[in-house]
Image (cartoon, rainbow, N blue to C red):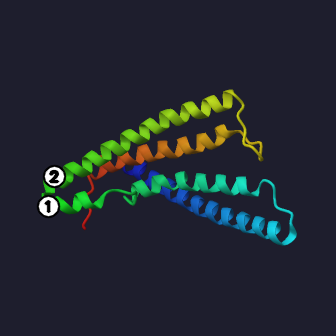
Amino acid sequence: MKVFSKTVSIATKALLTLGGILCLFSMLIGSVNAIMRYFFNSPIVWGDELAAYCVIIMVFITMPYLELTDDQICIGFITGVVKSKKWLKFLEYFRSVIGLGITVVMVIVGYDAAQRSFNRNVITAVLRMPKGILYGIVTACYAIAAIVWILIMARKGVYIRDN
């Protein structure tokens, strides 16, 4: 279990790094495209679409790291009001179960969407790239996030923040 947990930790950090690279690339291509459009009146036709896809992939590819470090968005007000450690533990467990459930549903739906997209040969507007690739990347990120949720629940039990 320790080796598996360490492997997931390394993989999620690698995904975070890749997300940073995608963010930089998106900013670069967007900036170059803006310069080409406004100063030379010759935009890169595929630039905006590629930058948008990079941002979309970046958002989902960093999600497993956020789950692992417990930096996902949550409602801190509820845990700030509840004083009992027992109830806090229950709320954190409930949040983990709900989070895991949502990620599992997203894996199932994402797999179906990717498969249908490939079967129907759906492609992007400008780049002419199969949309199934994008859906597959998002689905893989949700699958990794589900594994991370399971590890969080199994390894630490339920994590209680020190607020």
Q: Determine which quarter of the picture holds residue 80.
A: bottom left
Disc 2, SS: helix
Q: Which mark is residue 34?
A: none
Disc 1 target residue:
83
Q: Residue at 86% across / 66% down in the picture?
A: 41
Q: In the image, is residue 62 above or below residue 137?
A: below
Q: Which amino acid does label 2 sit on?
A: Trp
Where residue 27 appears, as percent x and y from the top left, is: 67, 66
Q: In the image, is residue 121 above or below residue 6?
A: above
Direction from residue 43 to residue 18 in the image, left or right = left
- Disc 2 crowd rating (10 Å Cα; few below 14, some 14-19, many 20+) is few
Disc 2 target residue:
87
Mark 1 to mark 2 CA distance (whole Å): 8 Å
Asked whether the beta carbons under mark 1 and mark 2 sit within 8 Å of each other, the answer is yes
Where residue 51 appears, as percent x and y from the top left, is: 68, 57
Where residue 23 appears, as percent x and y from the top left, is: 62, 63
